[in-house]
Image: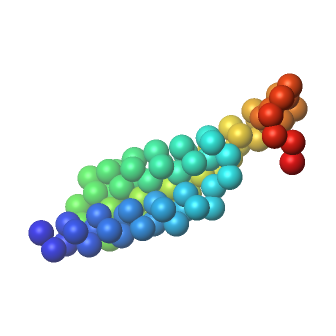
Amino acid sequence: MKTTSWMTAAALGSLLTLAGCATGPNQQLGIAGGAVGGAVLGNAIGGNTASTVGGAAIGGLIGNEVGRNADQRNYNNNRGYYPNNGPRY
């Protein structure tokens, strides 16, 4: 029981840390999805806390890059997220 609580806290902490660095909407979703998927895969492969947390971190990084590429593609195709109205930075 104690290991499960530590594992959950570590995975949530790493997810929040990575999500704080994300800038675009797809990048944030990519981090969350990648971290969850990586944690599940890491636990299935290793079956221990270290592999679960490591899988969450690696999955979050991969999801970050996939989301960043999607955000960049959307930005380039639409000439920004708000092509007609909305905030101008």
Q: Is residue 18 left or right of residue 83?
A: left
Up/down of 63 relative to 21, above or below: above
How did the renderer colour the structure? Answer: rainbow
88 in relation to 79, above or below: below
Residue farthest toward the front in the current orientation of the protein: 86
Residue drawn at x 87%, y 48% as measured from the top left: 89
Asked if residue 42 lies left or right of residue 20, the reply is: left
Name the spot of residue 65 as percent of width and height, x first. Answer: 64, 50
For residue 4, above or below residue 33: below
Going by the picture, which residue comes out furthest to the left? 1
Please report the residue visible at 28 percent of the width from the left and 68 percent of the height from the top. Answer: 7
Location of the N terminus (image quadrant): bottom left
Q: How many marks?
A: 0
Tell me: 78 left or right of 9: right
Name the one closer to the observer, 55 or 85. Answer: 85
Where does residue 55 sit, x and y in percent of width and height? 40, 59
* As drawn, 73 above or below 84: below
Looking at this view, is 37 or 14 the one in front?
14
Task: Identify the residue at horizontal 63%, vertical 61% (top origin).
Answer: 21
Residue 3 in the image: x percent, y percent?
A: 19, 72
